[in-house]
Image (cartoon, helix red, strand yellow):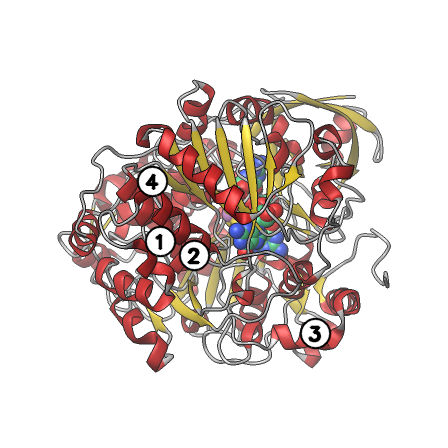
């Protein structure tokens, strides 16, 4: 295997040769021609939710632009193409060995190609055939009560599989149906719904090309949404401005080399016009400060507020009465920098606001997003082309999974439609969110858990607690493509890991929804490895048939994705066009989500502004820990141990500011203990970098052992980005 990018030396700009060298390395690992064929097949990209797809697969964006090259897309694709796990892997390795695998070792073990079973008290998983596996899963569901059964989904599965599984769960009698959003963008969904009546982006991809200002707040698209970087670089070239708000100066957000553009490739493109470094958790203060400054300088669009919003008086009143000193202390940002942000925004014609986990992973997650909506509304920047709100969504189909009803509560209209179409009664009580489900498991109140992809265990705060809770479950069934530590620590008394096909290997076509509410069609394809993998929908359909038989209808009919799509078109609001997508191949934008006129989905048609309480101010000696993704990982899946952008050589590092290390008399490279509310980690290497003082950063999921779940009440999302820690030399 070639190893072109070996050195974990920090680089000065994102993208460029490094991205290309990495892509070549990945191509060599699985064969360049094989990889090219995969990359150009008509299948939506499986990495983030920007939504690449179409005729040339992951290289065409929603505006039809080609080539859009992304090293992350290649990384994910190559990862699914590596060889199969050894036939005797589970005979050779006992549970204790498996528990000691790092996330990277588990990923590198290869594609799962056969079902495996762990029986109560056994020391080894054993290979079983599908019949045995399905019999055990069926029995577990038949023996469990609906209120003690839960269904979790990550965001990589298709709309078809997710819709089918949530339908089955409801017919079976439970609303304990949750997806990874609760640990991700749920705060965005809740806040956007409160403000506009819909929980997703108000813009399309094309809108970015019409904007002349973007605020990139609480997100690191250079690593996590690289295709957005092309848009940002173009905006700067057109003379637009970008304000980045982030406690860490992220390498690629200062300068990025867009690999598909010659000039940018060689010389790099400027990204941030202004880089603002608040405290982690300081965004409500900062955004209220921006509003205060807009108001003081006469730059609030009063006409827009009076015609198209409600609640603006209370919000403006809050901005007027709050003291500048409180804003500066709470945000950690100088008044002059806040004013500069406000004046850049005021000078722009069309502004967009893009954010990710830096805003949602806080106890004030919903307030953070509401405060951002307030700034957008106060400047009249929602409800017209080129302006609006853009949550940079995570998984490639996390939005679709939620749209098709994989959530604990169904909108009333959708629920009625589901009952009508299936001729059944959906359960009444709202189901658990992800964290509540784990709490129920800890109380011994979950007997069967079914996970459609993901790593539920590893995405939790307080991993000792998550381990305890998940190991109390009687039977846990995972549908997975690859191994991860969650299969072992997050095991039930009985555990099944069932091997599935990735979306682009499925025999039937599937659909995905991007962060721009655009529904893509994927053709599927041939499996990358030989084995017993099945399509997710196949497994779910067979299980539903075995558990429910003909009740309330013949489930085997749902083996056909076209059939599932017909039902989706009748049940999910705005998805009518999916009924004919097989014939028309016409991909579409979900109706009723994008606002190009200031007519919103609320009862009055006006957007609703909400005053946001100010979160607690950071104490002088308090450290707030941000847990984040490295340049070389996808969520809990680690591809590379080092982070080339931040100059962090391995997974057990902590990024600290120079002034903090001087204050604590700690040297760069020194080993420290990091103590959080839930646990501590020793022997952590200090890396001095461009991070706001009072804030430190470590990698997720390893750092999850430290974090106690302090949950945002409205979104139920933990404070993964402002966990209090002590750093002990
Ligand atoms: N390659 C790759 N792509 C991915 C993923 C991946 O793991 N790898 N994951 C996917 C998923 S599921 C998601 S949700 C997204 C995640 O995308 P991001 O949200 O970009 O990912 P994080 O690494 O969590 O980074 C959060 C950023 O927010 C900043 N931040 C932290 N706290 C604060 C704060 O209090 N205020 C502000 N203003 N900023 C803060 C951090 O410094 C960091 O730059 O990416 C998706 N795409
Ligand atoms: N401390 C901290 N914790 C966090 C975060 C953080 O920033 N900090 N981020 C949170 C966020 S934003 C998220 S989204 C969650 C992530 O939560 P999840 O989405 O649950 O986790 P992933 O790591 O994406 O899941 C990876 C696994 O999915 C399986 N998989 C991959 N592709 C497929 C497929 O095509 N089909 C099937 N069936 N399985 C597949 C593989 O087994 C792989 O190991 O973690 C959350 N937890
Ligand atoms: Mo996410």
Cβ(mark 1) to ligand 2 < 8 Å?
no
Which numbered disc flags the more N-terminal residue, 4 or 3? 3
- Give the secondary structure at mark 2: helix
**In-image side of 142 versus 474 (left or right):** left
Quarter of image, res 486:
top right
Q: Which residue is mark 3?
A: 34
Q: Which residue is mark 4?
A: 319
Whether label 2 touches label 1, CB < 8 Å: yes
Distance (Cα) linking label 2 and label 3:
26 Å
Q: Which residue is mark 1?
A: 164
Whether label 1 touches label 3, CB < 8 Å: no
Distance (Cα) linking label 1 and label 4:
47 Å
Distance (Cα) linking label 1 and label 3:
32 Å
Q: Residue at x 39, y 59 (%)?
A: 159
Which numbered disc flags the more N-terminal residue, 1 or 4? 1
Distance (Cα) linking label 2 and label 1:
7 Å
């Amino acid at each position: 295997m070639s190893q072109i990018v070996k050195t974990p030396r920090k680089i000065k700009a994102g993208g460029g040769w490094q991205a290309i060298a990495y892509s070549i390395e990945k191509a060599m690992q699985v064969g360049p021609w094989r990889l090219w064929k995969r990359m150009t097949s008509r299948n939506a990209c499986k990495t983030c939710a920007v939504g690449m797809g179409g005729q040339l697969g992951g290289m065409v964006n929603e505006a039809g632009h080609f080539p859009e090259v992304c090293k992350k897309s290649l990384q994910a694709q190559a990862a699914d193409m590596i060889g199969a796990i050894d036939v005797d892997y589970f005979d050779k390795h006992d549970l204790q060995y498996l528990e000691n695998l790092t996330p990277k070792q588990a990923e590198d073990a290869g594609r799962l190609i056969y079902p495996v079973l762990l029986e109560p008290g056994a020391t080894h998983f054993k290979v079983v055939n599908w019949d045995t596996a399905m019999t055990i899963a069926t029995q577990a569901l038949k023996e469990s009560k609906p209120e003690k059964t839960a269904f979790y989904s990550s965001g990589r599965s298709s709309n078809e599989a997710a819709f089918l599984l949530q339908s089955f769960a409801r017919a079976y009698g439970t609303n304990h149906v949750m997806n990874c959003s609760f640990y991700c963008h749920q705060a965005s969904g809740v806040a956007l719904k409160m403000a506009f009546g819909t929980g997703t982006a108000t813009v399309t991809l094309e809108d970015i090309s019409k904007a002349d200002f973007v605020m990139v707040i609480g997100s690191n698209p250079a690593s996590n949404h690289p295709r957005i970087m092309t848009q940002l670089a173009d905006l700067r070239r057109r003379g637009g401005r970008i304000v980045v708000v982030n406690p860490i100066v992220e390498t690629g957000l200062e300068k990025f080399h867009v690999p598909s553009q010659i000039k940018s490739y060689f010389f790099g493109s400027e990204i941030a016009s202004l880089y603002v470094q608040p405290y982690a958790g300081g965004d409500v203060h900062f955004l209220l400060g921006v509003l205060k400054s807009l108001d003081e300088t006469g730059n609030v669009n009063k006409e827009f507020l009076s015609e198209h919003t409600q609640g603006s008086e209370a919000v403006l009143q809050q901005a007027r009465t709050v003291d500048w000193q409180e804003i500066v202390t709470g945000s950690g940002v100088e008044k002059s920098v806040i004013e500069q942000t406000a004046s850049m925004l005021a000078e722009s014609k069309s502004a967009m606001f893009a954010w990710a986990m830096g805003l949602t992973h806080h106890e004030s997650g919903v307030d953070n997003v509401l405060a951002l909506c307030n700034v957008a509304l106060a400047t009249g920047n929602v409800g017209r082309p080129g302006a609006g709100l853009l949550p940079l969504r995570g998984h490639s189909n996390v939005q679709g999974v939620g749209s098709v009803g994989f959530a604990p509560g169904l909108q009333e209209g959708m629920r009625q439609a589901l009952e009508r179409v299936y001729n059944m009664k959906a359960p009444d009580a709202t189901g658990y969110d992800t964290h509540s489900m784990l709490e129920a498991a800890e109380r011994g109140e979950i007997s069967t858990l079914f996970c459609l992809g993901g790593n539920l265990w590893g995405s939790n705060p307080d991993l000792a607690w998550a381990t305890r809770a998940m190991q109390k479950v009687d039977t846990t069934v995972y549908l997975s493509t690859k191994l991860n530590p969650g299969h072992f620590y997050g095991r039930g008394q009985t555990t099944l890991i069932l091997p599935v096909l990735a979306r682009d290997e499925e025999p039937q076509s599937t659909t995905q929804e991007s962060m721009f509410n655009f529904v893509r069609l994927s053709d599927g394809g041939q499996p990358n490895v030989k084995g017993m993998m099945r399509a997710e929908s196949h497994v779910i359909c067979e299980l539903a048939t075995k558990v429910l038989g003909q009740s309330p209808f013949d489930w085997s009919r749902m083996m056909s994705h076209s059939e599932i799509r017909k039902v989706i078109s009748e049940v999910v609001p705005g998805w009518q066009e999916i009924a004919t997508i097989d014939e028309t191949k016409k991909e579409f934008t979900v109706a009723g989500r994008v606002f190009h006129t200031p007519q919103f989905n609320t009862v009055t048609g006006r957007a609703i502004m909400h005053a946001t309480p100010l979160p607690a101010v950071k104490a002088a000696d308090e450290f707030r820990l941000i847990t984040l993704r490295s340049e070389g990982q996808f969520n809990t899946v680690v591809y590379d141990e080092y982070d080339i952008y931040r100059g962090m050589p391995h997974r057990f590092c902590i990024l600290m500011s120079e002034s903090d290390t001087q204050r604590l008399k700690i040297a760069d490279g020194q080993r420290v203990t990091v103590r959080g509310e839930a646990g501590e980690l020793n022997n952590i290497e200090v890396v001095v970098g461009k991070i706001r003082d009072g804030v430190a950063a470590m990698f997720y999921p390893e750092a999850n052992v430290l974090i106690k779940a302090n949950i945002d009440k409205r979104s139920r999302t933990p404070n993964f980005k402002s966990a209090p820690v002590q750093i002990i030399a």
